[in-house]
């Protein structure tokens, strides 16, 4: 399992993106949240899979 959190502050307030996810063999599933000044703005699910080496 992996998790991340990024927080930015400016004159308009505090913005935070956080997420958590799980790698399984050749795939990934997780969720992400975006907050402005502590208020939940967006919540989503993310997923991906291995498609091969970069070319």
Image (cartoon, grey):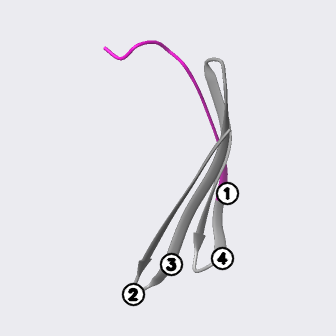
Residue at image position (55%, 61%) is 17
- Quarter of the image with the N terminus in it: top right
Is 36 drawn above or below residue 25 in the view shown?
A: below
Give the residue at mark 4. 39
Q: CA distance from mark 1 to mark 3?
A: 17 Å
The image quadrant that residue 25 belongs to is: top right
Precedes in sequence: disc 2 or disc 1: 2
How packed mark 1 is, by other alpha carbons closer than 10 Å (few <14, some 14-19, many 20 or more), is few
Q: Which residues are magenta?
A: 43-55
**Outermost residue, bottom direction?**
11
Query: Residue 24: image x %, image y %?
Result: 68, 23
Q: Are marks 2 and 3 in contact (CB under 8 Å)?
A: no
Query: Residue 18: image x %, image y %?
Result: 60, 58
Give the residue at mark 1. 43
Precedes in sequence: disc 4 or disc 3: 3
Q: CA distance from mark 2 to mark 1?
A: 24 Å
Instruction: Identify the disc placed on residue 11.
Output: 2
Residue at image position (62%, 52%) is 19
Query: Residue 35: image x %, image y %?
Result: 60, 69
Residue at image position (66%, 50%) is 44
Mark 4: secondary structure: strand
Q: CA distance from mark 2 to mark 3?
A: 9 Å
Give the residue at mark 3. 14
Q: Are marks 4 and 3 in contact (CB under 8 Å)?
A: no
């Amino acid at each position: 399992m992996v998790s991340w959190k990024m927080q930015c502050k400016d004159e308009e307030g505090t913005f935070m993106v956080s997420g958590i996810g799980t790698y399984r063999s050749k795939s990934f599933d997780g969720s992400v949240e975006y907050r402005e000044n502590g208020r939940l703005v967006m919540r989503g699910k993310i997923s991906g899979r291995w498609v091969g080496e970069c070319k």
